[in-house]
Image: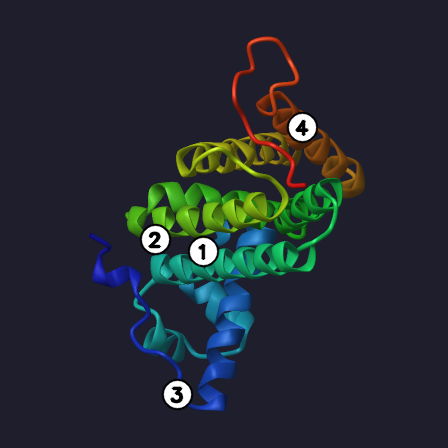
Amino acid sequence: MTQPALFPRKAPRQSRSAATVSAILEAAAHILDQRGLEGYNTNAVAARAGVSIGSLYQYFPGKDALTVTLIRRDHEALLAALAAAVERTRGARLAEGLAALARVAVDHQLDRPRLARLLDIEEDRLPISRDSHATIAAIAAQVETFLEQHLAPPDREHLTVTAADLLAIARGIIDTAAQGPIPDRHVLARRVRWALAGYLEQMNGSSPGAGRGVQPRP
């Protein structure tokens, strides 16, 4: 169970308090991105946000609560961008749809790559597995919706496995690329699209022994 100290103390109710919380969260993201975990503490965040430490503690009981809120904000942004891409490519060719999904995934990881990596590390450390599983399920549901729009999978189980595999392929390529010098995101998105398309071709039975897989919608 998620520990109470990982939750914000309260939600802002007025525009002024909402602006304060937004400034605190952006300051936390900046500190993590620029100074890493070593320089990340509530005093540094409060100073960067231009608020007193007491004001910070009105909303967040500690550093971990800030981090969890950043992780949740990051998840929400990814889901919104993914959902928009799925809707935008409804009726488009499969290749166009895969290109849009690949670009969403690449942009999400590379807009602030150091911050993205540190949030991934902290997500594994903190006891928020329920939140993480819910996010993975929501992301997978968007990919399943995409597949239903563009392909005719034989059954729900096959659809679920295909979506999970596509996510694993994309994350593996992007996370590995982001560990070194920041790659050209256009090139990286193209590599991800090629990998996803190649996987779907194999699932379509284009190679010996591939078996029954997904079929393009007529």
Q: Are marks 2 and 3 in contact (CB under 8 Å)?
A: no
- Count all numbered tags in the image, as a single digit: 4
Find disc 1 in the rendering and name its residue: 71
Q: CA distance from mark 2 to mark 4?
A: 29 Å
Residue type (three-letter) at the residue carrying disc 4: Ala
Whether residue 182 is visible here, answered yes or no, is: no
Give the quarter of the image for residue 206. top right
- Which quadrant would the C terminus be assigned to in this image? top right
**Which type of secondary structure does the marked residue at label 4 adopt?**
helix
Give the quarter of the image for residue 188. top right
Q: CA distance from mark 1 to mark 2?
A: 10 Å
Q: Nearer the viewer, residue 133 or 142?
A: 142
Q: CA distance from mark 2 to mark 3?
A: 24 Å
Point 79% across, 39% down: residue: 184
The tag on residue 13 is 3
* Mark 3 or 1, nearer chain start: 3
* Mark 1 or 4, nearer chain start: 1
